[in-house]
Amino acid sequence: MNKTALKADILLVITSIIWGFAFVAQRLGMDYIGPFTYNGVRFALGSLSLLPLIAFFASQNKNKPLVYHGEPLPENQAAKPLRRTDHILFLLGSFAAGTVLFAGASLQQMGMQYTTAGKAGFLTGLYVVLVPIVGIVLGQTTKLPTWLGAILAVLGMYILSAPDHLGQINPGDVLVIISAFFWTFHVLLIDKLSKRIDPIRLSAAQFAWCALYSIIAAFMFEHPDLNAILKAAIPILYGGLGSVGIAYTLQVVAQRDAPPAHSSIIMCLEGVFATLGGILILAEPAGLRNIGGSALMLLGMLATQWDVIFGGSNEKKS
């Protein structure tokens, strides 16, 4: 493994740890405020937290381009002048990423009102299975391990979220499962955009779009209250600075040097850390059903990446 790939993998592991424990923060935050208010404040905070970083890099490297024309430029090569199409690409790209991010984050946050942090972490991880399956539509070959992984993941999902009694489907589980489809599109979209647009500025812009949507939704469907927001300050700070400002940006930076399927392998550990955080901090049950379902889902996620795990040296970036 070369140094660039190793660096990307380390960044993705850190991302998984932060995101896993963020499920705990998301649960705690909604003890005081609604899901749209929580997301609106944390994504706004995440976007603002990147502005000093953007200013720092701008002062250090005035030649750093907003949009890459082909391959990223060497440090000592001057950036080409921005064209009108560059501004349009940045605006539309960040708008698309922010819109998909809003859909995924909103569904996940609403679902977490009714389910545990551990279950939400693994159900969200379905995108790891969905990424290669969506590749079929994009003309990519899907081999037997992918289908085996999908079957294992679906079985694990059923064990985790199946109702104890007929007709008692957990609405939180359903919402989180639907959100996984949007996370799938987000991973694929970021993979394409991060190779064309400066990743830090892309992150800040998509967070700003997501925050704007969330704040509008909060005033439409909730009653944002400053005192309640202050009571949820610690979960919001973790969600805004940690999960959004740091982790999403690490994802964007890492995905410039790691293919989406490879990224998904490491990010599937998010569910493991979410379960660990739920047990240690929220005292969530670690029963046989939860452990068994989680284990099957993790095996399914890893199975879909069989070729990458055992043939990683031959993997090419898409």
Image (cartoon, rainbow, N blue to C red):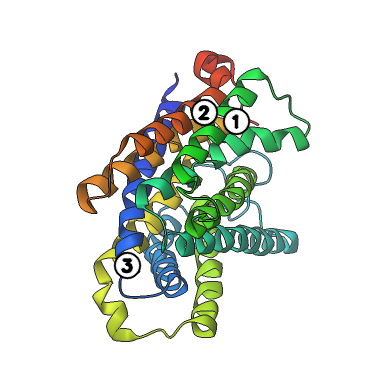
Q: Which residue is mark 3?
A: 29
Q: CA distance from mark 3 to mark 2?
A: 31 Å
Label 1 amino acid?
Answer: Ala
Would you name the residue on which mark 2 appears? 300
Q: Residue 295 location, x and y as percent? A: 40, 30
Q: Are the two marked residues, 1 and 2, in contact with CB atoms closer than 8 angstroms?
A: yes
Give me the C-alpha separation between circle 1 and circle 2.
Answer: 6 Å
- Residue 88, numbered label: none
Q: Position of residue 262 (x, y in %)?
A: 53, 30
Residue at numbered disc 1: 150
Which numbered mark, 3 or 1, is in the foreground of this view?
1
Query: Which of pointers 3 and 1 lies earlier in the amino acid sequence?
Result: 3
- Lower sequence index among marks 3 and 2: 3
Name the quarter where the C terminus is drawn.
top right
The image quadrant that residue 259 belongs to is top right
Relative to 159, is 183 above or below? below
**Quick one: label 2, few (<14), some, or many (20+) residues within 10 Å?**
many
